[in-house]
Image: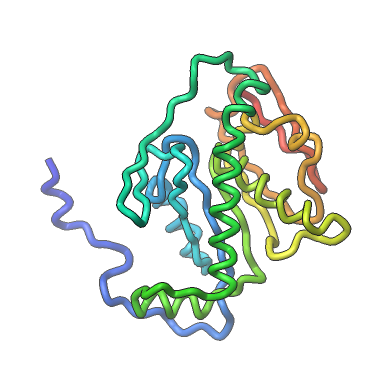
Amino acid sequence: MFRHLHWASHPLPKHSTILPNEEKWPIIIFSHGLGGHGETYTQIVLDLASFGYVVVCPEHQDRSSSYAKTFQGHVLTYQRPPDIPYLQPEVSEFRQTFLTQRVNEIRNLITNLKECKHNNQSELVIHILNNINISQLCIAGHSFGAATAIKVAQSYKNEHPSNTIPIISGLWLLDIWSTCLDSEVLNKGVQDIPICSVLSEQFAQGNICIHISCNTFDIAEHI
């Protein structure tokens, strides 16, 4: 059954070298959705990287992943929601602690990237980290990950209400799941930075429309 894999090759062979680049590379942090993990979106992030981005896919440890493992070796599996109505107030209340942890994880990741902490990484990873442009940072995500991106941007804006959002230069939202966001977050939206929101046809089927206010257009999700 797996015989054909014998002829497959990895797009980045072991001990590969990085082509020289006059400018440092922009960076994308991609947050996975419910039931996903750090490797779920491999094809998407490979495509993004092919355009010259360094893409980082954190594996969230909020128990929204199908599988995750901490640095201490603890295995974390998906935590199912309780038997509650699938309505925004109930769902957003249940997912609040998940979102808080996700935001903290991404903010800690950004801090480490800014300080270029290597933590005994390989020579290749160190070379990449030394050549990223943290001032060109995009936060991206799918579904619950897209909602996470909104919350991350808002968390920085809350600290700098009179200025543009520092660090983050854009958001990319794929099939944003807005049901997990409370009304305050939805009404506040995200200002001052470019946003690209993509809804696939399959995800957009439904008859309920929730809008997130932003600086250029409304992000509408049909659920």
Q: Where 92 sits versus 24, above or below?
A: above
Q: Quadrant of the C terminus?
A: top right
Q: Quadrant of the N terminus?
A: top left
Q: Position of residue 162 (x, y in %)?
A: 88, 58
On the image, the x and y values in percent for residue 30 come to 52, 53
- In the depicted view, which residue is nearer to us: 114 or 124? 114
Task: Give percent across and percent down for residue 10.
Answer: 27, 62
* Point 49% across, 74% down: residue: 117
Q: Residue at x 72, y 37 (%)?
A: 219
Q: How many marks?
A: 0
Point out residue 38 in the picture as x, y percentages from the top left corner. 41, 50
User: Residue placed at 48% from the left, 41% from the top?
Assistant: 62
The colour scheme used to paint the residues is rainbow
Which residue lies at the image location 71% right of the left edge and 32% below the top edge?
220
Q: Can you say whether 68 is above or below 23 in the image?
A: above
**Looking at the picture, does residue 49 appear above or below residue 101?**
below
Image side of residue 6 versus residue 158, left or right: left
Horizontally, is 197 left or right of 164 in the view? Answer: left
Between 6 and 69, the one nearer to me in the picture: 69
Q: Considering depth in this image, is 11 or 186 the residue closer to the camera? A: 186
